[in-house]
Image (cartoon, rainbow, N blue to C red):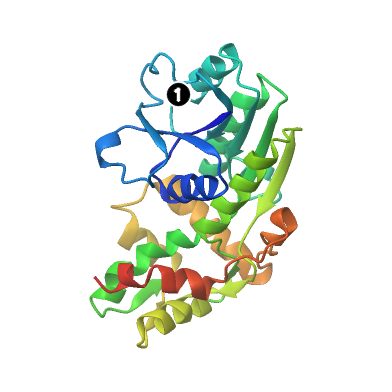
Amino acid sequence: MTILITGATGAVGRRLVADLLAQGRSVRALTRRPEQAGLPAGAEVVPGDLAAPLEAGLFEGIDQVFVFPAEAGVDHLVESALAAGVSGFVVLSSLAAAAEHPRDIGSASHRHHLAVEKAVSGRTGNFTLLRPGTFANNLLAWAFPVKTGRPIRAPYLASGQAPVHEADVAEAAAFLLARGEHTGKAYLLTGPATLTRRQQIEAIAQAVGRPIEAQEITEEEFRQEFGQFVPAEIIDMLLDYWRDTVDEPDVPRPLSAITGTQGRPLAQWAQDHRQDFLS
């Protein structure tokens, strides 16, 4: 049987397609622009947009679906998949949906990902939730100052997070899809170690081979500098997270707890994305 991957050309989806193909799995990859997908040979690439009517026959031969947390269309996706006889779902969610901390409840990430989870869990019990914490890819927001030789200006440089490599998320998803055990469980996932934001900057500096200056700024300065690019509720969520993790750093939930394999340290992520900070 075939596994349908939504969000197939995203940071996680692209690696997930490759991981499943490497395991000998049959993969159908859904993307809005098949001609630009650039996915590995062996994947069946089909056109589709979750926010639009789905192509007839999309679920033919499909037994499992990887559900990307799109802004719209997840309800229709799940309803259509179930009507076609799909037997299980792995849902890419967020650690915020677990609501482990007061800051999570009502946050933009909590609301959105909980709605995506309920779109599946409200219709079937044959699902698995994958809840990664903060993605290391969020650090790409620092690429511009690094490339241009400017200092990184950020609040709460002493706060500690455990950023997760997108490859770890894909590996966990591939493991859950390959097992086909959809029992209503939720799996939490972070990077293997907690690092302060200063240490995260140092990991990038080591990868690019030169020092990077870090300047700590206030919350108000952060709002002023990034408010024109980032919605206010996202800024609030980020500041709440960074502020809280000064005194209570992230607790690592490594990949090994799911797959038994070692998670990728931030230093590896920085090396893997070295060119993003250089060009």
Question: For residue 208, what is the image quadrant?
Answer: bottom left
Give the image location of residue 89, x and y in percent: 62, 31
The quadrant the C terminus occupies is bottom left
Mark 1: which amino acid? Gly
Give the image location of residue 104, x and y in percent: 62, 47
Image side of residue 109 versus residue 99, left or right: left
Image side of residue 114 versus residue 218, left or right: right
Work out whether 55 lies above or below 195: above
Give the image location of residue 147, x and y in percent: 26, 74
Report the residue at 60% width, 16% height from top. 82
Report the residue at 38% width, 43% height from top. 9
Give the image location of residue 141, x and y in percent: 36, 62
Q: Nearer the viewer, residue 233 or 70?
A: 70
The quadrant the N terminus occupies is top right
Image side of residue 32 versus residue 44, left or right: left
Q: How many marks?
A: 1
Crowding at dot 1, Cα within 10 Å, few <14 / some 14-19 / many 20+, comes out as some
Residue 175 in sight in this render? yes
Q: Nearer the viewer, residue 64 or 220?
A: 64
Residue 107 in sight in this render? no
Work out whether 203 lies above or below 120: below
Work out whether 139 lies above or below 210: above
Report the residue at 71% width, 49% height from top. 100
Work out whether 29 lies above or below 212: above
Report the residue at 68% width, 36% height from top. 128
Residue indicated by mark 1:
73
